[in-house]
Image (cartoon, rainbow, N blue to C red):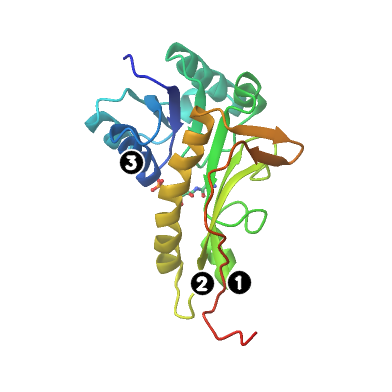
Amino acid sequence: MNKPGLRLGVLASGRGSNLESIIRACSAVKIHAGIEIVISDRARSQALEHARRNQIPAVHLDPKAHSSREDYDAAAVRLLHEHRVDLVVLAGYMRLITSRLIGPFKNRIINIHPSLLPSFPGLRSHRQALEWGVRISGCTVHFVDETMDQGSIIIQAAVPVLDGDTEETLEARVLEQEHRILPQAIEYLAEDRLEISGRRVILKSPKPSAGAMVVSPMIEIGL
Ligand code: GAR
């Protein structure tokens, strides 16, 4: 398949709504990228169905067929190389990845996480946020390194946590933002506008935008 722009390999475990947001952005040519392969560790992942429906090569890579996490990742790297992937996108990928995958794709793997990192890493981030009682939550796109959910942050989007929120309502509000910032982060990389400086990611030639502040709950601050 010959598509212009960045060649993406997407790894996804579940529902695949973030994958769909990338597919939509690619089809609408809102981002200069194309998905070359989708890999899932779960045979029944809806992500694989979305990929097939969109004529994107979709592979179930079965963890049980590999003796270790390293072997599994080595198999993933072979597939990604076969499809000449430039950027690996973890879009709801629920496996921890090893240096076998990170090494060959240094600073070329990004992940979307459903919290404002470094708060609430790992699993069940919305439950963690609700239990902590934060007033603002959100999502983060970050580079992936050997740590879990601690790589350099590319974009974050914040949403209010409302008093009546459940894990489901908060998830839905955050997910809407995930679908905006993940394609945006891919586009920054496609445009080669990101520079990593220590822990910080610098956006080169940022476009002017109105300053914004998020306050939650929406009370009168009186100042
Ligand atoms: C998303 O909320 C994503 O941020 C999260 O899983 C969900 C996948 O949804 N990822 C993680 O928790 C990674 N630690 P999707 O399959 O509909 O894209």
Between the C-alphas of marks 1 and 3, the distance is 29 Å
Give, as a three-letter code, the residue at label 3. Answer: Glu
Disc 3: residue Cβ within 8 A of ligand 1's nearest atom: yes
**Residue 2 in the image: x percent, y percent?**
33, 14
Q: Is residue 142 visible?
A: yes
**Residue extending furthest left?**
53
Look at the picture and state if 48 lies above or below 155: above
Can you tell which mark lies on residue 20?
3
Residue at horizontal 74 percent and vertical 41 percent from the top: 199
Q: Are marks 1 and 2 in contact (CB under 8 Å)?
A: yes
Mark 1 — residue?
A: 134
Dividing the picture into quadrants, the one containing residue 203 is top right
Establish if 221 lies above or below 153: below
Please give the name of the residue rendered at 52% of the width and 35% of the height, measured from the top-left corner. 188
Quarter of the rendering occupied by the N terminus:
top left
Residue 112 locus on image (x, y percent): 52, 45
